[in-house]
Image: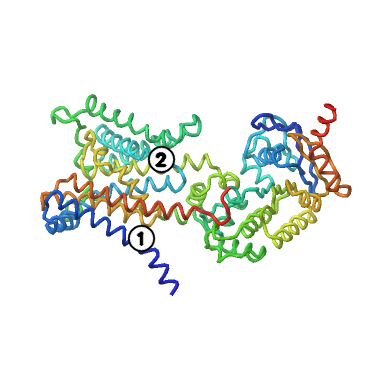
C-alpha cells in the first residue's frame, strides 16, 4: 500500500532519514518515539506539506514524491494532523465548512462554480450524528466546540473519505477518555475493513494497544521494528532511547 | 432576559464610541469657532441634499469609486491576502482605459468595451505582479503590493506628461476620450452610469463570497492558511486567481473614473482622492463582511462630501472635516479590530 524508500527530509540541524518501511493493507503500523526524533518531519514529507530531499514514496503502486498535497490526497491518503487548531480546522469557519473541505468528490458540494450549502450541511450533520460531536449545529463556528469534539470532527472528516491510507498523528492528543475510545475504535474498524493506517503517536500505550507492528524512531532514524504481539513498554521504551544507550556503552 | 443582556453588552461600547466621537467633533467645531448647528446641517446637506439632490448625487458618484475599491480589497483580504496595492491597480486600469479609448479607432461602444476590458486586464496584471513577487521571490505581499503603487503612479505621470499629453490644455493630462464613449448620466441628474458597474461588481462579490466554491476555498485560506494547505487546497493558484480578480475590479473602477467622471486621465486624479485607501478603511471598518462593505463605502463617501458641505455652509476648514473623519475611523476601527481578534480566538489553548 505504502512503500517508503530511503526518504530523507530536511530538518534544522541534522536531516531525518534515510527511512525505509512498508505498510500493507489491513494493518496499523505505529511509529513510536520521543517527540522530536523526526516523526513530524516524516509525516510532513509523506503528506506533501514539506518536500523530501531524496528518496521515493509509493502509494497504491504510484510514486507520489512529486505530487502536491491535493494530488496525494486524491491518490488515496487522509491525514489527521496533530494540531487541530491550526491545521485540522479553520476555527473561524463553520462546522459545515470545515467538514466539506478537502472532499474528494468535487461535485458532491458544488453545482458548477456554486456551492451546495444544503449538501454540505447534510454531510456535516451526518458526521455530527455518527461521531456524536457535541455542537450547536452545522452552522456553528468550529471554535465553539471543545477540544475533544474538534478532534472528532477532524477524525470524522478524514475517515469518511475512506481512503486506502490514513495517517493519524497523535489522534487522541488532549481528548477526553470517551472520545479516545471512540477514535481508537474507528481506527481499528478501518484497519479491519482493509485500510492501511500509519499511527504516529508519542503516547506509548496508544501505539502498543493499536499497532500490528511498531517502528521506533530515534534521532531521525528507525531504531527498531517490533511486532505488535511482542511489544511491551520496556521493549519499545528501550528502543526509544536505544542509540543513547549505545553511545553510553561505548564511552564506558 | 439573557438576550437583552447580550444586546446591551454589545451596544454599550458602541454608544460610548458614538458619544466620544460627538464630543470630539463638538470640541473641534468650537475650537475653530464655527456655528455648530450650521456646520452640522451643512454636513448633512452636503452629503445628502442640494438642489434636486445634487450633493447626494456627488456622494453617490464618489461612493461608486470607493465601494468599487472596497470590493476589490475585500476579495483579497477575505482570502488572507494583504493586497494594499489597490491604488496601483486602480491607476493601471484608469491609465489603460484612457489610452485605449484615445488611441483606438472604431465604433464608440466597441471602443468603450475594449477599453474597460483592457483596464480590468491591466489591473489584474498589476496585482498578479505582487503575487508573483511573493510566491516566487519571497517578497511579502504587504510590501510588494504597496511598493508597486509607486512605479505605476510615475509611469502614468510620465505618459500623460510627455508622450500622450494634451499639450494645448496646459495641464498634465491625456487627451479627452471620444465623447461618444462617455458614460451617460441618469436622466435629470449629474450622476453617471458608472455606479451601475460598481453595483454589478458588488453583487458579484456577494455571490462569490457566499455561494461559490472558489469564494469558500479562498475564505478558508484567509481564516487559516495552514488548514487550507493541510486539506489540499491549491493555495498558490487560489492566491494568484484572487489577486487577479481583485486587480481586475480595481482596474474597472479606474475605467469608471475615466469614462464616467473625468473623461481623460489627469495626473493624480485617482491617487489624490485616496479612493484605494478609503476603500481599505471601509472594508476594515466592517470586518470584511461582504454585505456591509457597500454601506460602509457609501458612509465614507458621505463623510467626505459632507465635509465639503460643512466647509461651504459654515466656513469650517476642510482640514477639520478631515480630522473629524479620522476621529470616526479611529474610534470605530478600535472597536471593529477588537471584535475581529476575539472571533479569531479559539476554545482550548492556541498552539
State which quadrant residue A95 falls in: bottom right
Please name the residue shown 83% across and 31% down the image.
A246
Please name the residue shown 25% across and 49% down the image.
B325
| Residue at the extreme top of the image, as rendered | B162
* First of labels 1, 2 by sequence position: 1
Q: In the rendering, at what x and y percent does residue A43 appear?
A: 69, 41
Please name the residue shown 51% across and 56% down the image.
A115
Q: Does residue B126 show up?
A: yes
Badge 1 vs badge 2, beta-carbon distance below 8 Å? no
Q: In the rendering, at what x and y percent does residue A177 appear?
A: 71, 60
Q: Find numbered disc 1 in the image and state the secondary structure of the residue it sits on.
A: helix
Residue named by callout 1 = B13
Chain to which mark 1 belongs:
B
Q: How is the image coloured?
A: rainbow
Residue named by callout 2 = B83
Q: Does residue B204 show up?
A: no
Image-based side of A21 in relation to B108, left or right: right
| Whether marks 1 and 2 lie on the same chain | yes
Q: Is residue B272 above or below residue B67?
A: above
Q: For mark 1, does the 10 Å Cα neighbourhood hold few (<14), some (14 to 19), or many (20 or more) residues?
A: few
Which quarter of the figure is the C terminus of chain A placed in? top right
**Residue nearest the viewer, comparing A228 with A238:** A238
**Residue nearest the viewer, comparing B288 with B234:** B288
Q: For mark 2, does the 10 Å Cα neighbourhood hold few (<14), some (14 to 19), or many (20 or more) residues?
A: many
Which quarter of the figure is the N terminus of chain A placed in? top right
Chain to which mark 2 belongs:
B
The numbered dot on residue A136 is: none
Q: Find numbered disc 2 in the image and state the secondary structure of the residue it sits on.
A: loop
Q: In the rendering, at what x and y percent does residue B117 appear?
A: 35, 40
Q: In the rendering, at what x and y percent does residue B200 appear?
A: 34, 52
Amino acid at each position: 500500500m505504502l512503500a517508503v524508500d530511503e526518504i530523507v527530509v530536511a530538518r534544522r540541524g541534522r536531516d531525518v532519514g534515510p527511512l525505509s518501511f512498508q505498510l500493507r493493507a489491513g494493518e496499523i503500523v505505529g511509529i513510536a518515539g520521543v517527540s522530536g526524533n523526526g516523526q513530524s518531519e516524516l509525516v510532513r514529507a509523506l503528506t506533501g506539506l514539506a518536500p523530501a530531499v531524496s528518496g521515493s514514496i509509493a502509494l497504491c503502486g504510484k510514486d507520489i514524491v512529486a505530487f502536491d498535497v491535493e494530488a496525494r490526497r486524491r491518490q488515496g491518503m487522509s491525514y489527521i494532523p496533530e494540531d487541530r487548531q491550526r491545521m485540522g480546522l479553520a476555527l473561524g469557519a463553520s462546522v459545515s465548512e470545515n467538514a466539506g473541505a478537502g472532499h474528494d468528490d468535487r461535485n458532491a458540494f458544488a453545482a458548477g462554480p456554486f456551492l451546495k450549502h444544503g449538501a454540505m450541511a447534510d454531510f456535516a450533520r451526518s458526521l455530527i450524528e455518527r461521531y456524536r460531536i457535541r455542537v450547536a449545529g452545522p452552522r456553528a463556528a468550529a471554535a465553539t466546540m471543545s477540544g475533544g469534539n474538534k478532534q472528532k470532527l477532524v477524525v470524522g472528516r478524514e475517515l469518511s473519505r475512506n481512503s486506502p491510507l490514513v495517517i493519524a498523528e497523535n489522534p487522541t492528543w488532549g481528548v477526553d477518555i470517551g472520545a479516545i475510545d471512540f477514535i481508537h475504535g474507528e481506527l481499528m474498524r478501518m484497519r479491519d475493513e482493509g485500510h492501511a493506517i500509519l499511527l504516529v503517536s508519542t503516547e506509548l500505550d496508544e501505539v502498543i494497544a493499536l499497532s500490528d507492528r511498531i517502528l521506533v524512531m530515534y534521532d531521525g532514524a528507525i531504531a527498531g521494528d517490533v511486532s505488535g504481539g511482542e511489544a511491551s513498554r520496556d521493549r519499545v521504551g528501550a528502543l526509544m532511547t536505544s542509540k543513547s544507550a549505545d553511545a553510553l556503552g561505548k564511552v564506558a | 432576559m439573557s438576550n437583552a443582556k447580550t444586546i446591551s453588552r454589545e451596544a454599550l461600547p458602541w454608544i460610548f464610541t458614538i458619544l466620544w466621537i460627538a464630543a470630539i467633533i463638538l470640541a473641534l467645531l468650537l475650537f475653530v469657532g464655527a456655528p455648530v448647528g450650521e456646520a452640522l446641517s451643512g454636513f448633512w446637506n452636503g452629503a445628502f441634499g442640494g438642489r434636486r439632490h445634487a450633493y447626494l448625487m456627488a456622494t453617490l458618484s464618489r461612493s461608486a469609486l470607493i465601494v468599487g475599491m472596497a470590493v476589490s480589497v475585500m476579495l483579497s483580504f477575505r482570502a488572507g491576502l494583504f493586497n494594499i496595492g489597490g491604488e496601483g491597480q486602480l491607476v493601471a486600469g484608469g491609465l489603460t482605459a484612457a489610452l485605449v479609448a484615445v488611441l483606438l479607432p472604431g465604433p464608440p461602444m466597441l471602443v468603450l468595451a475594449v477599453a474597460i476590458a483592457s483596464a480590468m486586464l491591466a489591473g489584474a496584471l498589476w496585482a498578479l505582479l505582487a503575487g508573483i513577487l511573493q510566491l516566487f521571490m519571497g517578497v511579502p505581499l504587504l510590501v510588494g503590493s504597496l511598493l508597486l503603487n509607486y512605479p505605476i503612479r510615475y509611469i502614468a505621470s510620465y505618459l500623460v506628461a510627455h508622450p500622450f499629453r494634451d499639450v494645448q490644455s496646459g495641464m498634465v493630462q491625456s487627451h479627452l476620450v471620444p465623447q461618444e464613449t462617455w458614460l451617460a448620466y441618469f436622466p435629470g441628474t449629474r450622476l453617471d452610469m458608472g455606479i451601475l458597474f460598481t453595483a454589478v461588481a458588488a453583487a458579484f462579490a456577494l455571490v462569490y463570497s457566499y455561494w461559490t466554491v472558489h469564494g469558500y476555498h479562498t475564505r478558508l485560506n484567509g481564516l487559516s492558511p495552514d488548514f487550507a494547505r493541510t486539506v489540499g487546497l491549491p493555495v498558490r493558484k487560489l492566491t494568484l486567481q484572487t489577486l487577479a480578480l481583485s486587480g481586475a475590479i480595481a482596474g474597472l473602477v479606474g475605467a469608471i473614473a475615466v469614462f464616467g467622471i473625468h473623461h481623460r486621465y489627469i495626473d493624480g486624479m485617482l491617487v489624490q482622492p485616496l479612493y484605494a485607501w478609503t476603500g481599505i478603511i471601509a472594508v476594515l471598518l466592517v470586518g470584511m463582511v461582504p454585505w456591509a462593505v457597500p454601506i460602509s463605502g457609501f458612509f465614507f463617501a458621505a463623510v467626505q462630501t459632507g465635509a465639503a458641505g460643512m466647509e461651504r455652509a459654515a466656513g469650517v476648514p476642510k482640514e477639520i472635516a478631515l480630522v473629524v473623519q479620522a476621529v470616526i475611523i479611529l474610534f470605530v476601527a478600535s472597536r471593529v479590530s477588537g471584535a475581529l481578534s476575539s472571533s479569531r480566538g479559539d476554545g482550548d489553548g492556541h498552539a
